[in-house]
Image (cartoon, grey):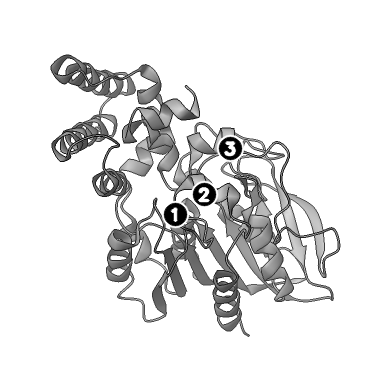
């Protein structure tokens, strides 16, 4: 299926892509000849970058990444960057930008040691990407934190997490289990259930060329399919139920479908995402939490997610939720917030977003 085909056949074709970071869409939009954006770091930087490897005792035997450290002996406060969903490497190579490299550059210039790593099964990390769930990726971040605590130039009591998109919910998952984490920054982490987030997106944006009634009919189908693939039943039975829903819709009102549409919904990651409820996760951390959502984000939409984030974090006096004007899912200054704009935006991350994250992290990592 081509990228054009995915957009042509309606929202449900995009489920594997729009869930947090655009996994399916991202693959063809990785830049082969990466353009250099103004924020992309040059070879000359005022910090040291080292290739590192570490193991997850319950997962991959080797996770590979880059550790950026300020000059001097330390010990330094440290940050682990937690990536979003989809096949994203340590630099966040996506749409011609290097989102996580730019973020790490800014934080390292502010005096933080920063660890960013290839996700399991990608880049130089081993393990299986295709069979992993959010919980598996969270265990890899826990391994990264444990690795930092073994380094003599890292202060083990001043380690924070900055997570983007799916990473925005993984970060509080890790912090909820580790009371020594000193802060969490959630960049476009969702506050509502995964299945509801996708339904809300379809409801808000509608379907191109379709009436309100047709959109509602599609929503009912999506909801039924979500229920089928997350049911407590053997995998073959879940697939059979979902397939039958598509076949019934095709027979009843001519709604087209193909097995390629169903396949992303049957992955372990998508099944766990659809059933995920972030509220209990967000109530776990006792450390400082900063939750950020761009008001032009078309994946984690501000109208639905900011109230949910605010409710879930209400019991933490050190938590705050901010709506950032004019920013998209990647925290760029955007026109509409559509993914089609991302590659053409010169800035990789808006300076005001970098300043907010960096200054807040600095304030919450002081000895």
User: What's the residue at 52%, 49% (across, down)?
Assistant: 341
Q: Earlier in the sequence, mark 3 or mark 1?
A: 3
Q: Dot 1, how many residues are within 10 Å of its Cα: few (below 14), some (14-19), or many (20+)?
A: many
Tag 2 and tag 1, C-beta contact below 8 Å: yes
Classify residue 23 as left or right of residue 355. Answer: left
- In this rendering, does residue 309 appear at all? yes
Rendered residue at 31%/20% (across/down): 257
* Residue 128 appears anywhere in the view: no
First of labels 2, 3 by sequence position = 3
Q: Nearer the viewer, residue 68 or 43?
A: 43
Residue 103 shows which numbered tag? Answer: none
Mark 3 nearby-residue class (10 Å; few <14, some 14–19, many ≥20): some
Give above or below for 345 relative to 57.
below
Q: Between 30 and 224, which is closer to the camera in this rendering? A: 30
Badge 2 density bin: few <14, some 14–19, many ≥20, Cα 10 Å: some
Spot occupied by residue 138 in the image (x, y as percentages of width and height): 51, 51
Q: Position of residue 3 (x, y in %)?
A: 49, 29
The residues bearing labels 2 and 3 have C-alpha atoms spaced at a distance of: 12 Å
Residue to which mark 3 is pinned: 29
Q: Which residue is mark 2?
A: 341
For mark 3, give the secondary structure: helix
Horizontal relation, residue 350 to residue 195: left or right: right
Front-lying residue, 303 or 126: 303
The quarter of the displayed image where residue 122 is located? top right
Q: Secondary structure at mark 1?
A: loop
Quote the CA–CA distance across marks 3 and 1.
16 Å
User: How far across and how far down the image is residue 65, in percent?
Assistant: 71, 50
All told, the count of numbered labels is 3
Q: Which residue is mark 1?
A: 337
């Amino acid at each position: 299926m081509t990228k054009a085909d995915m957009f042509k056949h309606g929202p449900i074709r995009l489920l594997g892509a729009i869930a947090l970071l655009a996994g399916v869409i991202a693959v063809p939009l990785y830049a082969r000849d990466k353009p250099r954006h103004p924020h992309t770091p040059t070879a000359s930087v005022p910090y040291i970058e080292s290739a590192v490897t570490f193991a997850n005792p319950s997962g991959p035997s080797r996770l590979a990444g880059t550790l950026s450290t300020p000059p001097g002996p330390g010990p330094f406060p440290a940050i682990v960057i937690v990536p979003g969903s989809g096949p994203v490497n340590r630099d966040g190579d996506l749409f011609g930008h290097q989102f996580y490299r730019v973020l790490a550059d800014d934080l390292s210039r502010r005096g933080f040691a920063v660890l960013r790593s290839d996700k399991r099964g990608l880049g130089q990390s081993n393990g299986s990407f295709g069979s992993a769930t959010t919980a598996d990726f969270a265990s890899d971040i826990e391994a990264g934190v444990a690795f930092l605590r073994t380094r003599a130039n890292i202060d083990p009591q001043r380690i924070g997490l900055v997570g983007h998109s799916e990473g925005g919910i993984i970060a509080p998952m890790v912090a909820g289990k580790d009371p020594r984490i000193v802060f969490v920054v959630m960049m476009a982490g969702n506050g509502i259930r995964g299945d509801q987030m996708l339904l809300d997106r379809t409801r808000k944006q509608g379907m191109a060329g379709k009436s309100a009634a047709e959109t509602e009919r599609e929503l009912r189908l999506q909801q039924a399919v979500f229920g089928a693939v997350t049911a407590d039943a053997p995998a073959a039975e879940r697939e059979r139920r979902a397939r039958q829903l598509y076949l019934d819709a095709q027979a009843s009102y001519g709604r087209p479908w193909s097995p390629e549409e169903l396949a992303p919904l049957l992955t372990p990651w998508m099944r766990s995402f659809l059933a995920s409820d972030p509220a209990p996760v967000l109530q776990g951390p006792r450390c400082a939490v900063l939750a950020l959502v761009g008001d032009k984000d078309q994946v984690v939409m501000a109208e639905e997610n900011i109230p949910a984030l605010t409710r879930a974090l209400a019991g933490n006096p050190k938590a705050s939720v901010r709506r950032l004007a004019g920013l998209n899912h990647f925290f760029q200054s955007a026109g509409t917030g559509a993914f089609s704009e991302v590659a053409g935006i010169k800035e990789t991350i808006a300076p005001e977003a970098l300043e907010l994250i960096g200054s807040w992290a600095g304030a919450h990592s002081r000895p």
